[in-house]
């Protein structure tokens, strides 16, 4: 097999694993944010700072996730998959 192809296959596998980790982190953050802003909790009892910090982490993780998905698409295209 071509060494360049092997390198791309390895990068693809690594990127797919990273995407899975990021997706799981996003799903976890989504649930934690939902719990932070529960519907029937009086607004004065909501920890807005915690929710805001979680939302910022969600946003930065989502950006990284989209970058990894774009890399996966490019690698698959280069590999003809």
Image (cartoon, rainbow, N blue to C red):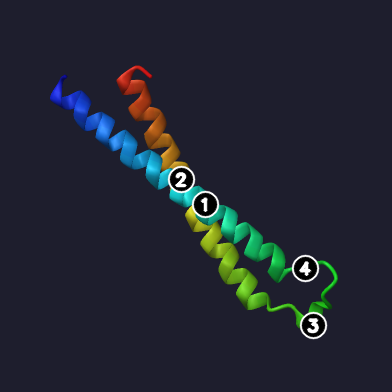
Q: Earlier in the sequence, mark 3 or mark 1?
A: 1
Q: In this view, does 49 lie above or below 3?
A: below
Using the numbered discs, state the Cα–Cα distance from disc 3 to disc 1 in whole angstroms. Answer: 31 Å
Q: Is mark 4 on a helix, strand or loop?
A: loop
| The C terminus: image quadrant | top left
Mark earlier in primary sequence (4, 1): 1
Residue ID for mark 2? 20
Give the percent coordinates (x, y) of residue 50: 61, 75
Contact (CB < 8 A) between labels 3 and 1? no
Residue displayed at 34% across by 17% down: 80
- Real-space Cα separation, disc 2 to disc 1, in angstroms: 6 Å
Q: Quadrant of the N terminus?
A: top left
Q: Position of residue 41 (x, y in %)?
A: 82, 75
**Tag 4 near tag 3, CB within 8 Å:** no
Q: Residue at left 48%, top 55%?
A: 61
Marks 3, 1: nearer the viewer: 1
Query: Which residue carries the number 3 mark?
Result: 44
SS class, disc 3:
helix
Evaluate if marks 2 and 1 touch, with contact meaning CB atoms under 8 Å apart.
yes
Residue holding disc 1: 24
Label 4 to label 3, Cα distance in Å?
12 Å
- Position above or below: 65 against 12: below
43 vs 68: above or below: below
Would residue 50 appear left or right of 15 to someone viewing this image? right
Horizontal side of 49 relative to 4 (left or right) equals right
Q: How crowded is mark 4: few (under 14 residues within 10 Å), some or many (20 or more)?
A: few
Residue 75 in the image: x percent, y percent? 33, 29
Residue reaching furthest to the top: 80
Question: What residue sits 44% from the left and 44% below the top?
Answer: 19
The reply to whether callout 4 and callout 1 are in contact (CB within 8 Å) is no
Residue located beneath label 4 in the image:
38
Report, in whole angstroms, how far the alpha carbon at label 4 lies from the one at label 1. Answer: 21 Å
């Amino acid at each position: 097999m071509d060494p360049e192809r092997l390198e791309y296959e390895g990068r693809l596998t690594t990127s797919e694993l990273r995407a899975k980790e990021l997706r799981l982190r996003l799903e976890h953050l989504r649930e934690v944010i939902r719990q932070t802003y529960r519907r029937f909790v009086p607004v004065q009892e909501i920890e807005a700072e915690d929710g805001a910090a979680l939302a910022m982490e969600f946003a930065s993780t989502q950006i990284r996730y989209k970058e990894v998905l774009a890399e996966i698409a490019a690698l698959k295209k280069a590999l003809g998959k």
